[in-house]
Image (cartoon, rainbow, N blue to C red):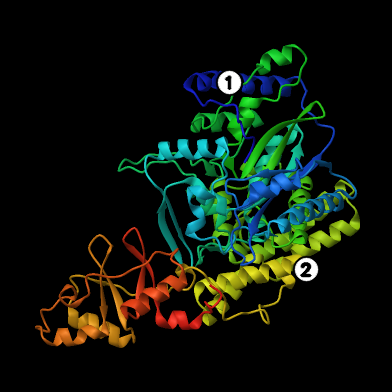
């Protein structure tokens, strides 16, 4: 999530000065490009690995700060939430055994952080979205206590002027409001960097946009969020919506989302992209900057373009242009932000090699993408990949093609040639691109998760299913088996688990009644579905009562055609919250001789727990 800017006051005066620095940084970059100062005689690759921290129950473990302190290595940094950590890999020249070197460093860094995590009873898992993240871990108490994160949340919330809204529809639908940007913390990525010479930047950037759809399609690994089966790569929708400050009104107006794919092909230079972003997005973060970039250039010093770099870090293009300085020389690079973390290190390195090979091997006929494809078709390809993954149908150079056909017949040959062009070791090329080919012909991480999640959900409650799924993902990851070789989950299932909170065992798919429903229909619904108790809501969607079989006698005394649910329901309902301990819920049910307990949040029912639920789960350890 970038630098921590601890010294910033975020004052209006600082913002005014920062804006001028931003203008000057653009001019400085244009001057450096014009004067041939940008490095163009070497190509480097780099990566950022985001990871999730989980406890022994495979749920989020919020101790990133303690682990980073213990690991004591500048390669590691914090993320938005206290259950995420990021590792920044070193840049390496694109040549020979560079992918082996990157993989070795990645494995070394992960082993290092695993060692510190073990001291804190924590495990490390690589996945696009951790299946066991619940609404409980999306509160402000899980935000990493660093000024940058608080400032982003404060400003975006103020700009939004209302709660953020997440609404994603796949096989299931997720629709809810939330009061912070912490939903962004659900997303964990493997971000890829490739240095690009300035004279080739626009051609490379447009090509990067063109291939994004099919590349994402073969890499999907994030189909689940809060127990809902949504998009094959749910991160794409979630990241945009969790940072969306656009205010919806009755007026028809166009606003560019802060997280997005882009709106058009690029034509001139990288500064064109930066200018577009500055023109369409407000300054989110500021910091004090000591030296003006134009003055530094005059003095023969290469500027870091601090204002531009900070601003750019708060505009989240899926293919992001970046400026940097390494060994005293300025360079440009493209950051691929749409690749999810996991399922294994081998899968991630295969994704890396595939994308770099594609970028490096771009055939000359694709130098002018605007003349070959309409931008909206490319943007739609990206959306189709996110929603449907390997099942997506793409428009490629005017033809309708499946993900498999594009990847195997069109893109893999380009990637092979691109890696050969930079003398990458043949063994690495065959090994890593072979994983991509097998995955295109087999299954992605998203497909494996969905298939097994559906099977588990037939056998056990939702919470148990996502725990077992996460456990199996972790186990396969430790063995570093590429996901196309992962087998169905068998032999590791625990139908009885020790749980603590009612949210972990409650039923969430509920039939509900309303106060003004006719009682005879309500009782018929209960009889048809063999349900012994149904919650009753008022017109505001709040829990207003409970109807059970014991009310049948009361119904007999009323006019069967006129009686309403409100006439026979229990109005004083005993309820609990999701974080009520199971043992406490059991005591309440015994004390009051009741067979069920509604589970509520802010007067809204989110689940129900019954005696049957308690009998199915082991609470003896509580």
Can the viewer see residue 556 in this picture?
yes
Residue 568 located left or right of residue 66: left
Q: Nearer the viewer, residue 12 or 30?
A: 12
**Quadrant where the N terminus is found in the figure:** top right
First in sequence, mark 1 or 2: give its number.
1
Report which residue position mark 1 lands on: 23
Q: In the displayed structure, would residue 271 be above or below residue 167?
A: above
Q: Is residue 87 left or right of residue 498?
A: right
Q: Residue at x 85, y 57 (%)?
A: 429
Q: Quadrant of residue 392?
A: bottom right
Q: x%, y% of residue 382?
A: 58, 53
Q: Position of residue 165 (x, y in %)?
A: 41, 51
- Disc 1 and disc 2: Cα gap in Å? 50 Å
Q: Depth check: 173 or 144 in front?
A: 144
Report crowding for label 2: few under 14, some 14 to 19, many 20 or more residues within 10 A (C-alpha): few
Which residue is rendered at x = 38% and y = 41% of the image? 247
Q: Identify the residue at horizontal 81%, vertical 26% (top origin).
A: 328
- Secondary structure of the residue carrying numbered label 2: helix
Report the number of discs: 2
Q: Secondary structure at mark 1?
A: helix
Q: Is residue 366 visible?
A: no
Name the side, left or right, on which 197 lies relative to 558: right
Residue occupied by mark 2? 479
**In the image, is residue 445 above or below residue 455?**
above
Query: Is 196 on the left-hand or right-hand side of 497?
Result: right
Tell me where residue 325 sits by quadrant: top right
Say which mark, if any, is on residue 318: none
């Amino acid at each position: 999530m970038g630098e921590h800017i601890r010294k910033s006051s975020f004052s209006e005066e600082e913002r005014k000065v920062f804006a001028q620095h931003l203008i000057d940084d653009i001019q400085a970059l244009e001057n450096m490009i014009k004067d041939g100062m940008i490095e163009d005689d070497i190509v480097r690759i780099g990566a950022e690995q985001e990871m999730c921290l989980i406890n022994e129950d495979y749920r989020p473990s919020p101790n990133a700060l303690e682990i980073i302190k213990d690991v004591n290595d500048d390669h590691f940094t914090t993320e938005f939430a206290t259950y995420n950590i990021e590792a920044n890999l070193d840049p390496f020249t694109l040549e020979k055994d560079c992918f082996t070197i990157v993989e070795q460093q990645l494995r070394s860094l992960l082993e290092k952080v695993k060692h510190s995590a073990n001291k804190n009873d924590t495990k490390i898992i690589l996945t696009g979205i951790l299946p066991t993240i619940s609404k409980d871990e999306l509160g402000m108490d899980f935000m990493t206590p660093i000024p940058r994160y608080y400032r982003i949340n404060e400003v975006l919330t103020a700009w939004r002027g209302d709660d953020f809204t997440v609404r994603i529809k796949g096989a299931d639908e997720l629709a809810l409001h939330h009061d912070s940007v912490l939903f962004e913390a659900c997303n964990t990525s493997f971000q890829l960097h490739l240095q690009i010479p300035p004279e080739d930047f626009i051609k490379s950037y447009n090509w990067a946009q063109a291939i994004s759809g099919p590349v994402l399609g073969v890499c999907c690994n994030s189909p689940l969020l809060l127990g809902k089966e949504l998009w094959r790569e749910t991160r794409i929708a979630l990241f945009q919506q969790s940072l969306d400050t656009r205010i919806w009104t009755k007026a028809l107006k166009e606003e560019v989302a802060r997280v997005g794919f882009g709106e058009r092909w690029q034509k001139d230079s990288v500064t064109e992209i930066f200018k577009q972003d500055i023109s369409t997005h407000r300054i989110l973060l500021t910091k004090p900057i000591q030296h003006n970039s134009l003055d530094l250039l005059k003095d023969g010093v290469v500027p870091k373009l601090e204002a531009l770099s900070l601003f750019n870090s708060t505009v989240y293009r899926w293919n992001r242009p970046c400026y940097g300085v390494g060994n005293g020389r300025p360079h440009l690079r493209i950051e691929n932000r749409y690749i999810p973390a996991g399922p294994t290190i081998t899968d991630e390195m295969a994704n890396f090699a595939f994308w770099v090979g594609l970028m490096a091997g771009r055939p000359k006929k694709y130098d002018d993408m605007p003349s070959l494809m309409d931008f909206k078709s490319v943007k739609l390809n990206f959306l189709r990949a996110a929603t449907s993954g390997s099942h997506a149908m793409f428009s490629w150079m005017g033809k309708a093609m499946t993900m498999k056909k594009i990847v195997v017949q069109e893109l893999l040959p380009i990637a092979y040639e691109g890696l050969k062009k930079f003398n990458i070791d043949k063994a690495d090329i065959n090994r890593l691109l072979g994983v991509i080919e097998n995955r295109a012909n087999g299954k992605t991480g998203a497909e494996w998760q969905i298939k097994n999640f559906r099977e588990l959900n037939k056998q056990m409650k939702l919470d148990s299913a996502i725990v077992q799924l996460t456990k199996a993902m972790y186990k396969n990851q430790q063995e570093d088996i590429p996901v196309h070789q992962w087998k169905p989950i068998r032999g590791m299932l625990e139908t009885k688990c020790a749980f603590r909170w009612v949210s972990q065992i409650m039923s969430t798919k509920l039939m509900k009644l309303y106060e003004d429903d006719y009682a005879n229909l309500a009782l018929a619904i209960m009889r048809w579905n063999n349900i012994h108790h149904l919650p009753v809501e008022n017109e505001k969607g709040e829990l207003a009562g409970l109807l059970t079989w014991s009310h049948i006698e009361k119904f007999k005394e009323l006019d069967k055609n006129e009686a309403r649910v409100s006439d026979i329901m229990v109005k004083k309902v005993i309820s609990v919250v999701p974080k009520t301990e199971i043992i406490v819920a059991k005591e309440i049910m015994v004390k009051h001789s009741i067979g069920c307990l509604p589970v509520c949040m802010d007067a809204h029912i989110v689940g129900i727990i019954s005696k049957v639920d308690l009998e199915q789960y082991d609470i003896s350890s509580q």
